[in-house]
Image (cartoon, rainbow, N blue to C red):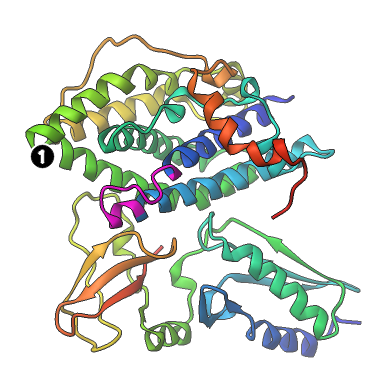
Amino acid sequence: MTPLIKYLLHLADNTLILSQRNSEWCGHGPVLEQDIAITNISLDLLGQARNLYSYAATLIGGEATEDSLAYLRKEREFRNCLLVEQPNGDWAQTILRQYCFSQYQYALYQELLNSKDPQLAAIVEKSIKEVAYHLRWSSEWVIRLGDGTEESHRRMLKAIEELWAYTGELFEAADYEKDLQQEGIAADLEKIKQEWQLKTEAIFAEATLPMPRNVFVQTGGKQGIHTEQLGFILTELQYMQRAYPGAKW
Amino acid sequence: MVNTKADKEKIYEYLREIVDPEIPVLSIMDMGIVRDLILHDDEVEVVITPTYTGCPAMDMISMQIRMHLSSYGFPKNKVTMVLSPAWTTEWMTEEGKKKLKAYGIAPPNPRQQGCDEKLFAEAEAVQCPHCDSWHTHRVSEFGSTACKALYQCDDCKEPFDHFKCH
């Protein structure tokens, strides 16, 4: 498997798994408008995953399709970062997870607009307009909850505690990212990390939330070593194709 | 066989008959999602671009184009999807915007003021498609489909969809 295919699967898995997590809110959002918002974001992410998987499938060739990549790979073959597979928790935890990911994704996609791989650049150009919505929406919610009531502030602190160890992995380049970075296809994660930290510090300051320092960084997802969460997600996501192989809607 | 200019114009006419399944007053030509029409020796190729990456209408639109062309005597046809340049509401025709408004959906504003990163920005001023008042407010940035936001008119009190700038 070439570094480009691994990288496309990494990007696609990030969006598919976060989409699946967010979709768990469907019908359970705190208010109707936000239920619609989080499921709209879920739909955008699923659309991005489809584009990335379809492109990966053409490179893999043979029988591979966007569906086989989503439904028939095992846990160890998924390369999503650990952050996106973490449970929804309460609304604060879902918001913080979305914010951390969107801020990263926006900075990353801005760099990937200049990727030397034209199809990847085209997918990113299409997706980044949607990511801008997700980022603005989740940033506003981080501020609203952090600088809200005592209760919402307390819940944001708890969310930071739950999720922070998984944010560092976003900026630790896997071997395939390093290879592609040299070829001008993937982005320089050090640059993205600085951008992410600057923006996040500003938003946390406005949200009256402390920015954690020197936190242990949990990694592994980009290489297929996941937390216990991913297996449960795939069990649900892949159930139909596993139980009834080749079933069509 | 299908390589004359007259054929091309005819095919564009046929494409004008195909509507967005979620907004059935807008044709795919009004939406600005048809990017090119290529007449090969024995095949018609229609190049389209998606509005939003996750829009479920795109698969149906592709299928409709193929069935439509087949029924008009172009059985050899294909639909190609391109992503770049990315679709923008700027490509929606003026006629399309008028049709949207008549249908009860506020059309996208010409300036892309809703698309920047600024937080807690004041919601775009959007005209009520029912009573033409500008005295409206945004209820939700996300609406019934990926392309819409939900508004309410403060004068006639009607809620309405707004096709977001994108």
Specify whether residue A185 is in view.
Answer: no
> Which residue does the image show at 53% across and 27% down from the upper left?
A232
- The percent position of residue B81, horizontal first and vertical second, equals 67, 60
Other-residue count near label 1 (Cα within 10 Å), few / some / many at <14 / 14–19 / ≥20 = some
> In which quadrant is the C terminus of chain A drawn?
bottom right
For the magenta stretch, what is the residue range?
Answer: A23-35
Determine the residue positioned at 49% across, 72% down: B91
Q: Which residue is under mark 1?
A: A148
Front residue (pair A94, B38)? A94
Q: Chain of mark 1?
A: A
The residue that appears at 25% across and 31% down in the rendered structure is A200
* Amino acid type for the residue under numbered disc 1: Gly
Left/right of residue B34 with respect to residue B121 in the rendered view: right
From the viewer's perspective, is residue B120 above or below residue B25? above
Q: Position of residue A201 (x, y in %)?
A: 21, 28
Image height of A54 relative to B5, above or below: above
| A27 sits left or right of A58 in the view | left
The quarter holding residue B164 reads bottom left
Main secondary structure type of the part rendered in magenta: loop
